[in-house]
Amino acid sequence: MKKYVLRRLLQLIPILLVITFLSFGMMRLAGSDAVLQKMENTGMVVSQEVIDSARAELGLDKPFLTQYFVWLGNLLRGDMGTSYISGQDVFSTFLSKLPATLLLTAVSILLTIVISIPLGVLAAVKQNRFTDYMIRTASFLGNSMPNFFVALLLMYFFSIRLKIFPVIATGISVQSVALPAITLAIAMSAKYLRQVRAAVLDELSKDYVVGARARGISFYTTLTKSVLRAALVTILTLLTLSIGSLLGGTAIVESIFLWDGVGKLAVDAINMRDYPMIQAYVMWMAIIYVCVNLITDLSYRALDPRIRLGGEKV
Amino acid sequence: MKRQPVLSVEDLSVSFRMYDTGLEQADLQVISNLTLDVCPGEIVAIAGSSGSGKSLLAHAVMGLLPGNASVTGKILYKGMLLSQKEKEKLRGKEIALVPQSVSYLDPLMTVGAQVTGRTPDEKTLKAQKEIFQRFHLKEGTEKLYPFQLSGGMARRILVSTAVLSNAQIILADEPTPGLDLEMAVEALKIFRELADEGKSVLLITHDIDLAFHIADRVAVFYAGTTVEIADAEDFQKGPKALRHPYSKALWEALPQNGFKPIPGFQPYAKDLPKGCLFSPRCPYKTEECEKEIPMTKVRGGYVRCIHAD
Amino acid sequence: MQIEGKNLSFRYGPKLPWVLKDVSLTVKEGERVGLVGPSGYGKSTLVRILAGYLKPEEGQVLLDGKPLPAKGVCPVQLIYQHPENAINPRWKMKKVLQESGMFREDIMGALGIEKDWLQRYPRELSGGELQRFCVARSLFPGTHFLFADEMSTMLDVITQAQIWDLMLKEVEARNLGLLMVTHNMELAKKICTRTINLEKMNHEMKI
């Protein structure tokens, strides 16, 4: 078990090498660079010499491979560099944005779970009855509204009419996180609800459910102890992917609510060709996905004895 | 004096509403006018063709049929008419099922928890150990999960579950396939002992040669109805003692009795023939056979054939 | 032609107990062999290894002294206990036959497949009827061995006699080698030229 976790974490090393190299390369292909972007944004017209010296200062005049290995060498010494744009330390800038993203992720995932699992199970149990139709209609609505639209609707009702929550985030607080989290949760719940319903229906149609009924076990017990546990394996896979992408930040929602998370940071960094910042973001994403997948696989093992004991591959 | 049956099924019909491609609807009549009873202390074996509604009968009695099934007729337990609610109350306690396949075991639960319940008392645990021993299931088997069992082990677990439930009547749906002769005989012996204690067993099986020797009575099913119900003794004696041409054909198709198959197929539930359901395959068919055929008493047994004597 | 299993050993995981240990057997063309033995002695596993569906941990499977071909029609065809699991439930029966090129009058005639079954879905046929399709679609020109793993266990005795009757006619006409797993000694007696008891051959017993 320990060995397994260690092996999975060691896999991170080649993944990080490949992915940082690729992102480095792709940013080069995109043309332009941090110096040009900075000049353009300030609207100054400067001479080629100034540009060249600014480039030399950042090391942008060196060949591509050299730049990559210099960056890599610094990284190994624990230095992620400074932002080309702000001149601040990349690592501490990134860290400062993390709490916001973590909070938003946690709250929106929690909301999604609280909304989608009970409703999905209810819809499955009441299949093709009124309750089911209502839940499915709600899910359909949630699915068809784009994020920004939901965000604006929520702002209108909760901030402008009811004045419960602030329109834009005022620091990291429960008040501020509510609207962005609800926006994200609505979209995700609408999607999950259908998946939960399908997974539960699928489990309910299996023979072992009939078998349990025949043994006189109540439907509620079978539902909670067996069906839900089996359905969770499917749901978990989906949740993992969502947690991954949420931790990567949600640029649109973060921008609308001025929520200062890593999503906004990443979009800004890409626009400004702020390479060290982009690299930090890319590495963060790789680490998230490897870790989240690892946690999911471990929870599969806890949920399903076939995986835990049979050596069956996930 | 006739004893009061534990379970009696009267004029039971079951049909399924099926949706074909598109919106076409069809009703599949899978059980028609079936009548059967089981008395205390008795094993009634149900023999018959695959797909003749044997398992469905068990599921109908337990109230386990899916939502698109419609049921007419009566099912009585100790003389009391059973509604769905009562079936739910009785199942697992008074009426137990040995399901047909391993897939009826919960894949996420240990075998022990399924056989004895999650929180068994001392007595149940002792009984479980005893029965596992009889079935040559090693100590520790109760800690395994269903996917770790071989087909034969799973079958023995399924039988153990029903036996331990202490039910008055056990509906055993194919308890023996995948078991070697020794184990199959052991399973049937356990059923015989339960019956001798006053309980009842409805034994649905293709291993009819074994069933003939362990059961008290045998009911032969064909295309969803009973064609003959008679003492098991008659089935041991052979075709001369039997009444329905299908029962005779079953006997003669056994490997040890000639291995001779009659031609033809059981009719498909979508287009059942008029009158006698066996008539398309019957050598004695006459015009009369297209009318409704009742069960009649012939030589001490019941038969659904106008030509039986 | 002959298929030979040499000193086969198998287990489902490196630390799990052996299911088979040091088992050898040979089936020749034109021979009908019954494989019997108590539950849990690895009968099904052995058949699967011989058909090339599982790789043995030790030992080898040889067809006329050479390993089984990895590509093309396997000369060994396997028929299972549950035909409903071996057929695509979303295909009509005609398509099932067409897939393996067996939508042919002679094959359907030989196995007593009725015309109106072809337009049905698998769930609209009984186990015995489906099993005929499973046999039909394994009768390739290149098939030399048929392995039947409890093929008729879930069938009633009339259907069982029907399908074995048809099967044996084909096996004889094509001079196929037959290996059948069964618990029914009477059935084995009726069908096989010899029987092998795995209890005596398998050096590792499980439960």
Image: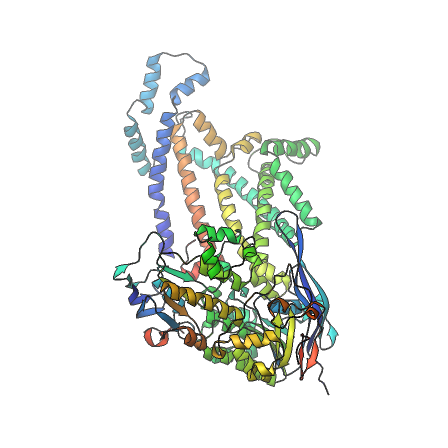
| Near-viewer residue (B266 or A181) | B266
| Near-viewer residue (B53 or A160) | B53
Location of residue C86 in the rendering, given as x and y in whole percent from the top left corner: 47, 58
Location of residue B51 in the rendering, given as x and y in whole percent from the top left corner: 58, 65
At a point 32% along the width and 23% down the height, the residue shown is: A60
At a point 45% along the width and 73% down the height, the residue shown is: B140
Q: Is residue B276 above or below residue A293?
A: below
For the C terminus of chain B, the image quarter is: bottom right
Q: Is residue B161 above or below residue A10?
A: below
Name the quadrant containing residue B150. Answer: bottom left
Q: Is residue B96 left or right of residue B210?
A: right
Task: Describe the colour scheme in one phrase.
Answer: rainbow
Location of residue C97 in the rendering, given as x and y in whole percent from the top left corner: 47, 53
Location of residue A291 in the rendering, given as x and y in whole percent from the top left corner: 42, 46
| Near-viewer residue (A31 or A196) | A196
Q: Is residue C130 above or below residue A54?
A: below
Name the quadrant containing residue C26. Answer: bottom left
Let me know if residue A58 appears in the view: yes
For the N terminus of chain B, the image quarter is: bottom right
Residue furthest out toward the left: C65
Q: Is residue C88 above or below residue A143?
A: below
Name the quadrant containing residue B26. Answer: bottom right
